[in-house]
Image (tube, grey):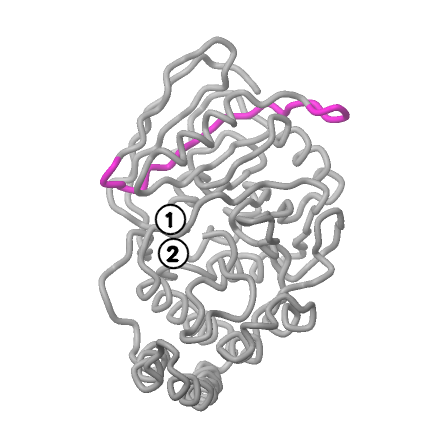
Amino acid sequence: MRTGAEPLELTVIVPHYGDPAPAAALVAQLRTQRPAERHPLPSHEIVVVDDRSPRPFDAPGATGDAAPVRVVRRERNGGFGAAVNTGAEAARGELLLVLNSDLSIEPDFVARFVGEARPWLPAVVSPHVEETRGRSGWAGRHFPRTRHYAVEWLAPLARWRHLPGLHEAVGHDTRAVEGAVVTVDWVAGAAMLLPREALLRVGGIDEGYRMYVEEVDLQRRLRERGLPAVYLGTVRVEHVGGGSSDDERRRRWLVAARLRYARKWDEGPLRQRLALTAATLVNLAANLPRRALGRDVDPLATARFELDLIWGGDRGDRPPAATRADRPGSTEHETGAPGTGHATGAHDADAPPADAEAGR
């Protein structure tokens, strides 16, 4: 529920589930943001959406001039999309800045990012996302196609995942490098700025996705209404965390989300399954001689697992980031003084990708 207080320029939304330490670290960085050299700090608020976490997020108390923090607690777990939608409904800002809880930002990030993004608005804008060991998170991407997934599935290509041609082949827009500013098909949801009104106008993020791909779906709907996606490589964030669930479950959710997207956008889910099955046979043929050479790989077990991912259907336990079509109510807790203010290429040699979507 949106409050009736004075509107702000910006609401920063931080979805939270699991260990509260990463979210607390990010919120601490957000509360002490300062103006940039050429850009003022926009009037803003910080909204943490606690997605029925088993380890709740406790809002920090008021500290000097630090920005206030509102915690919106969902009554049921709903996942990334539901958390963002809940935050957007409660937001007072005209712009929304959605940040993964496991990001690290510079002291003038908010001012610089919003200031440099303004000439492109209305749009969905992402900064450069840097993963661990200095790797690019490839925040700018092409709309997914079956050929991207098939190439990504091919384990023998893992050794060449650093080559630009392979990045393009799996859907990364290789123009989107640090320092560049380009329009792309879609940007990663780890850090994205967009108008609140535009998000609400298209009905928010589709909560039917269990995990992954929801930001692709959203930006495709926004593109139909004329909003571009912009990669703003002159500003960066660091993605310091990782997934909260084991790799096998994450792979299942990823494949399920991609098939759902294919059904929704008439991209041929059967064609996708057949292409991945062909890639699995290539992986099997590559793993057999590796096993003969003494490598620690079970070619048949790996192939069975991959085929189960492809054809096994939408099975398994609901994940912590599971999504639901309905959006339950929430309660708010406010502290502080009022004021203003995923794998990046081909996967490991023995298995399909654990997290090919950025920023989760």
Q: Secondary structure at mark 2?
A: loop
Residue 54: quadrant of the picture: top left
Residue for point 37% across, 70% down = 256
Could you tell me what secondary structure mostly forms the magenta stretch?
loop
Queried whether the magenta region covers residue 73, the answer comes back as: no
Horizontally, residue 337 falls left or right of residue 331, namely: right
In this figure, which residue is indicated by the disc labeled 1?
A: 82
Q: Residue 300: horizontal and vertical position, in percent?
A: 32, 86
Residue range corresponding to the magenta coloring:
36-55
Q: Amino acid at mark 2?
A: Glu
- Identified by mark 1, the residue type is Ala
Residue found 49% across the figure and 64% down from its top:
356
Q: Tag 1's secondary structure?
A: helix
The residue that mark 2 highlights is: 207
Q: Quadrant of residue 212?
A: bottom left
Separation of residues labelled 2 and 1 (CA atoms): 6 Å
Residue 267 image offset from top left, x and y in percent? 52, 78
